[in-house]
């Protein structure tokens, strides 16, 4: 738990909100006995394994292991830090966080809130401009580009007028200071003093985050003598490489279709989306970043890339391939003819033709090899060497040895080079060291089992506060063999000693590690015990843990005894033998 936020405030917030209400605002929940069930929002699944408990105010996925309380859900689903989740739920609960008690991160979150408000005001101003009588030529331009009025409304397109200070004066009238306008990236300082509007005489494409909050703007010029696009600078709420244009609208379609189409620009997204291809995102004119790939992994692992049919589009695609592979994504590429982009393809040939190109997308091996053949002479030894080198940099990133072997075989056939030469070259490459993703860690946590007796005792202690004292008279945290259970039990004992609340939803605020939260939630969803069965289960668990502790201690002593014998340390050997004898008597 963050030491900077008073624990009584965290408890107050959690006591006033309902986790079912919070989560149901993001995903549909269905009643399942005393709990609610849904398809997990953190990994793709067809059979619901995500459970929300209104009694305990916690959630747990039996598929991927993701667990937590309301704070944790917001942090994971909205990719925010703990202080921001606290501030959001505090507002919802009507709990005031005193300014002097707010940590720096919460104050930063307050700045973010102000920037979201300013961006929303600016967007309203731009929308109003586009709807004005003087903007008919701009509306005609959008119509000629195939954008319908309802699409303009859905995407909230706007117009920055030609004046140098129109937006600035408008925001001033709303009580917004120049410093905040500059922090939002909406105005620029003049060399001789003063400010002017960043966007002028341009069509405005608002950029939204996953929660549909305005975080920045793309501004397209209609006068071809100027640079085509001017974009918002990076601000506290807008980091280009961490967002994908249109994901707020397409995320559910991506999850439902279990694949995403990645395009490049704003119109490359808007036109296909308007025509019914909704499982799409735009990378905003750059190669994909690791943050963007991991954002997409929340919804699917299947990707079709559709970049412009030019050399820049090819380069952007090639740069992204290796990273997608390392993140475990299944990648295909749908190349377009030279000079064409998704926007123009859909307008000229129709969305059905565009969907057909996506359906017939090439595998990454075929695509990359085809591009390399156009750049290097496959008939010359030097050209073959270049092709092999670049292909192997991709092939080497696959975890699966069978896939690597198959691609090596195909590469050998394609460039007519004996396979053993290619194998020799790949052996020279450094072994791949992929970054460990949160999904990988969850898989490891799920696979590493915890003694059921230890988990059951945690469940009993959380359900009956009086059992904590009884159990701790019999056991100490050190008696628990798993470090995670030992840590949870230790915190529970400390809270009990201080007379504090030990509800599951509150307990997990004391842990930074996901494993501890997962353990608490898994324990609470274990089978119920009543009456004598419950009492017997408690005693059996205590007995099993004691036996296991003795067994582990004996094994450890046995190793120490062997070490003392080997080193000839008689004094240490005698002491260890006495301790070992005493342990044997305890077990009898």
Image (cartoon, rainbow, N blue to C red):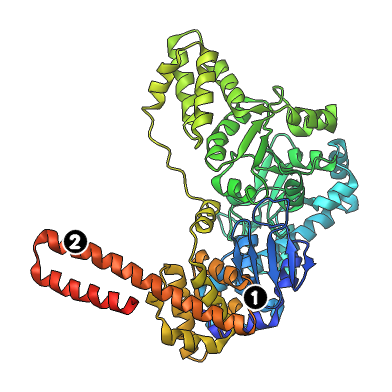
**Mark sitting on residue 439:** none
Q: Is residue 399 above or below residue 370?
A: below
Q: Is residue 531 above or below residue 452?
A: below
Q: Residue 142, percent across and down?
A: 84, 41
Left or right, 571 with respect to 328, comes to left
Q: Secondary structure at mark 2?
A: helix
Q: In the figure, residue 543 lies in which quadrant?
A: bottom left
Q: Residue 100, percent across and down?
A: 53, 83
From this viewpoint, is residue 511 visible?
yes
**Mark sitting on residue 528:** 1
Q: Is residue 539 above or below residue 251?
A: below
| Foreground of the two, 484 or 328 | 484
Left or right, 196 with respect to 495, comes to right
Q: Which residue is mark 2?
A: 562
From this viewpoint, is residue 1 visible?
no
Q: As drawn, which residue projects farthest toward the bottom?
A: 499
For label 1, count other residues whose C-alpha is less than 10 Å away and answer few (under 14), some (14-19) or many (20+).
few
| Foreground of the two, 205 or 447 | 447
Left or right, 576 with respect to 450, comes to left
Quarter holding the C terminus is bottom left
Q: Residue at x 54, y 90 (%)?
A: 466
| Foreground of the two, 15 or 196 | 15
Q: What is the total number of numbered labels drawn onto the structure image? A: 2
Q: Residue at x 34, y 76 (%)?
A: 587
Q: Residue 467, percent across and down?
A: 53, 86
Label 1 – label 2 distance at C-alpha: 45 Å
- Marks 1 and 2, the one that precedes in the sequence: 1
For label 2, count other residues whose C-alpha is less than 10 Å away and answer few (under 14), some (14-19) or many (20+).
few
Q: Residue 393, percent across and down?
A: 47, 29
């Amino acid at each position: 738990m963050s030491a900077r936020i008073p624990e009584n405030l965290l408890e107050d917030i959690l006591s006033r909100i309902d986790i079912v209400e919070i989560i149901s605002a993001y995903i549909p929940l269905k009643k399942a006995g005393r709990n609610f069930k849904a398809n997990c929002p953190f990994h793709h699944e067809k059979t619901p394994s995500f459970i929300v408990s209104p009694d305990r105010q916690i959630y747990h996925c039996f598929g991927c292991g993701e667990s937590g309380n309301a704070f944790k859900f917001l942090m994971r689903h909205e990719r925010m830090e703990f202080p921001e989740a606290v501030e959001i739920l505090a507002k919802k609960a009507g709990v005031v966080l005193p300014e002097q008690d707010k940590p720096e991160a919460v104050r930063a979150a307050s700045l973010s809130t102000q920037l979201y408000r300013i961006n929303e005001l600016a967007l309203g101003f731009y929308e109003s401009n586009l709807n004005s009588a003087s903007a008919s030529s701009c509306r005609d331009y959008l119509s000629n580009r195939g954008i319908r009025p309802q699409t303009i409304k859905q995407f909230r397109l706007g117009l920055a007028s030609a004046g140098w200070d129109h937006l600035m004066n408008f925001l001033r009238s709303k009580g917004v200071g120049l410093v905040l306008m500059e922090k939002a990236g909406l105005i620029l300082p003049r060399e001789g003093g003063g400010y002017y509007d960043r966007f002028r005489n341009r069509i405005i494409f608002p950029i939204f985050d996953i929660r549909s909050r305005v975080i920045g703007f793309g501004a397209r010029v209609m006068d071809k003598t100027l640079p085509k696009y001017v974009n918002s600078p990076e601000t506290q709420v807008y980091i280009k490489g961490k967002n994908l244009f249109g994901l707020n609208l397409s995320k559910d379609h991506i999850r439902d279709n279990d694949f995403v189409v990645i395009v490049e620009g704003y119109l490359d997204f808007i036109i296909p989306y308007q025509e019914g291809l909704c499982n799409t995102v735009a990378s905003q004119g750059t190669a994909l970043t690791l943050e963007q790939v991991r954002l997409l992994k929340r919804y699917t692992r299947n990707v079709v890339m559709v970049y412009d049919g030019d050399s820049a589009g090819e380069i952007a695609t090639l740069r992204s391939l290796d990273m997608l592979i390392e993140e475990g994504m299944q990648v295909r590429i749908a190349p377009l003819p030279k000079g064409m982009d998704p926007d123009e393809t859909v307008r000229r040939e129709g969305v059905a033709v565009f969907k057909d190109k996506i359906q017939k997308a090439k595998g990454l091996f075929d695509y990359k090899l085809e591009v390399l053949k156009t750049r290097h002479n496959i008939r010359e030894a030097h050209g073959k060497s270049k092709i092999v080198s670049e292909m192997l940099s991709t092939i080497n990133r696959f975890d699966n040895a069978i896939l690597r072997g198959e691609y090596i075989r195909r590469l050998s056939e394609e460039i007519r080079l004996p396979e053993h030469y290619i194998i020799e070259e790949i052996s020279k490459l450094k072994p791949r060291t992929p970054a460990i993703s949160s999904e990988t860690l969850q898989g490891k946590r799920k696979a590493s089992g915890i003694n059921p007796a230890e988990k059951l005792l945690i469940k009993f202690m959380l359900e009956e506060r009086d059992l904590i004292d009884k159990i701790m008279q019999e056991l100490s945290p050190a008696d628990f063999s798993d470090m995670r259970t030992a840590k949870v039990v230790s915190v529970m004992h400390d809270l009990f000693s201080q007379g504090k609340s030990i509800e599951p939803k509150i307990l997990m605020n004391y842990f930074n590690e996901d494993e501890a939260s997962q353990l608490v939630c898994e324990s609470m969803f274990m089978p119920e015990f009543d009456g004598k069965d419950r009492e017997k289960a408690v005693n059996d668990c205590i007995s099993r843990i004691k036996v296991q502790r003795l067994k582990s201690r004996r094994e450890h002593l046995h190793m120490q005894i062997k070490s003392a014998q080997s080193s000839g340390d008689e004094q240490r050997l005698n002491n260890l033998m006495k301790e070992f004898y005493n342990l044997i008597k305890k077990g009898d």
